[in-house]
Image (cartoon, helix red, strand yellow):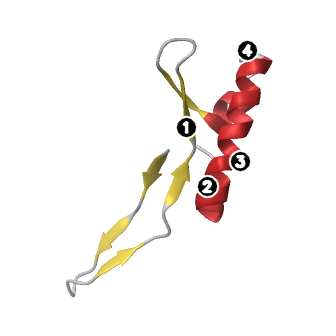
């Protein structure tokens, strides 16, 4: 998973922290070591169905942990 957070340093020295954004990834060890962006690969017609099945399993695990923080990449 890749997580990004936007920080804003205000003129008065305080910092605003935006809601984190989680981009689900899955490491495909069967085809080498490929870090796959889950949402992009699920939408890609060239990705084999057996890989998509693994991506869906990974996405469900990720959703169970970070849920609302998942954002399209």
Q: Position of residue 73 (x, y in %)?
A: 58, 43
Q: Quarter-wise, where is residue 48 in the image?
A: top right
Which residue is labeled 2 in the image?
Answer: 70
Label at residue 12: none
The reply to whether dot 3 and dot 2 touch (C-beta < 8 Å) is: no
Which residue is labeled 4 in the image?
Answer: 46
Which residue is labeled 3 in the image?
Answer: 60
- The residues tagged by marks 4 and 3 sit, at their Cα atoms, a distance apart of 22 Å
Mark whose residue sits in front, 3 or 2 = 3
* 31 or 18: nearer the viewer: 31
Using a 10 Å C-alpha cutoff, classify the residue at mark 4 as few (fewer than 14 neighbours), some (14 to 19) or many (20 or more).
Answer: few
Q: Quarter-wise, where is residue 12 in the image?
A: bottom left
Furthest-bottom residue in this view: 12
- The residues tagged by marks 3 and 2 sit, at their Cα atoms, a distance apart of 11 Å
Q: Which badge, 4 or 3, is on the more N-terminal residue?
A: 4
Q: Position of residue 16 (x, y in %)?
A: 36, 78
Q: Callout 3: helix, strand or loop?
A: helix
Q: Callout 2: helix, strand or loop?
A: loop
- The residues tagged by marks 1 and 4 sit, at their Cα atoms, a distance apart of 17 Å
Q: Residue at x 74, y 37 (%)?
A: 56
Compared to 50, does 7 lie above or below? below
Q: Residue at x 41, y 61 (%)?
A: 5
Q: Callout 1: helix, strand or loop?
A: strand
Q: Residue at x 71, y 18 (%)?
A: 47
- The residues tagged by marks 3 and 1 sit, at their Cα atoms, a distance apart of 12 Å
* 38 or 10: nearer the viewer: 38
Compared to 35, does 59 lie above or below? below
Which residue is labeled 1 in the image?
Answer: 25
């Amino acid at each position: 998973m890749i997580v990004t957070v936007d920080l804003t340093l205000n003129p008065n020295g305080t910092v605003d922290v935006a809601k984190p954004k989680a981009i689900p990834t899955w490491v495909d060890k069967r085809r080498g070591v490929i870090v796959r962006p889950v949402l992009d690969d699920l939408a890609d017609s060239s990705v084999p169905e057996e890989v998509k099945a693994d991506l869906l399993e990974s996405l469900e695990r990720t959703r169970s942990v970070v849920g609302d923080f998942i954002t399209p990449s």
